[in-house]
Amino acid sequence: MRNDAPTADDRWTELLTDANAIAAEYDDDGWESVVLEPSSVSPSEAEERFGLNVSIDRETFEQVEAHVADSEATFGDAEVYYLPVDEDGTTHDDSRRFALAVERDADNSIAVFVPVTYTLPEAKTVFETALLEEQLLLHVRATDADETDPWVTFSHDDPSLFLSKSDVQSWEFSPGE
């Protein structure tokens, strides 16, 4: 495991391995893939950055930013892979969730792989709001960025893909209320 990973949980390493394997499949199909390796992922309730904040190294951020800034690029498509909760009696933190968002620009065959992890208690408000508003935002930024540096934001109109059905069922609200 990298020293600057958002969690020491071995499922994070598994998620990164899966991200790289899926990216290799995209590459084999002629896509250009960029796999992010976040040093932190944190829920944010700040009005200007509501969603999940994802910090990555500057070099990778600049690569993603260049793709997004390209006037030809449109990342209007995404796939989300959700790593199911371990129910095998291991000692994993059962409140921690893992997902991989593949942000796709199908017209230009560019894919940005954004692995995320979060704990339900810390991210509950973000996900409740995202489910009600039908939008989850992933805000990507360089780890060493200052307040004036840019963000790259990816939007997901089905936040339920980042959760298990049992997560939402245990909450005291119902999407669509």
Image: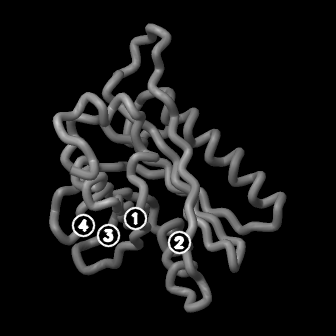
Q: Which residue is mark 1?
A: 140
Which residue shows up at 22% across the image and 54% down it?
Answer: 129
Within 10 Å of the Cα at label 3, are there few (<14), some (14-19), or many (20+) other Cα atoms? Answer: some
Which of disc 1 and disc 4 is earlier in sequence?
4
Q: Position of residue 64 (x, y in %)?
A: 53, 72
Label 4 or label 3, whichever lies nearer to me, is 4
Please name the residue that numbered disc 3 is placed on.
Answer: 145
Q: CA distance from mark 4 to mark 2?
A: 18 Å
> Hey, what amino acid is under mark 2?
Val
Looking at the image, which is closer to me, 130 or 123? 130
Label 1 is placed on what type of residue?
Answer: Val
Secondary element type, mark 4: helix
Mark 3 vs mark 1, foreground winner is 1
Image check: 117 left or right of 1? left
Q: From the top left corner, tell me how far across and down residue 113 is, in percent.
A: 57, 57
Residue that badge 4 annotates: 49
The disc, 1 or 2, on the residue closer to the chain's N-terminal end is 2
Q: Could you tell me how far apart the alpha carbons at marks 1 and 2 are, in whole angstroms?
A: 9 Å
| Amino acid at circle 4 | Arg
Instruction: Looking at the image, tell me whether mark 3 or mark 2 is earlier in sequence order.
Output: 2
Give me the C-alpha separation between circle 3 and circle 2: 15 Å
Q: Which residue is mark 2?
A: 64
Callout 2: SS: helix
Image location of residue 170, percent across then percent down: 26, 28
Q: Please report the residue visible at 57 percent of the width from the left and 67 percent of the height from the top.
A: 77
Q: Residue furthest top?
A: 89
Q: Are marks 1 and 2 in contact (CB under 8 Å)?
A: yes
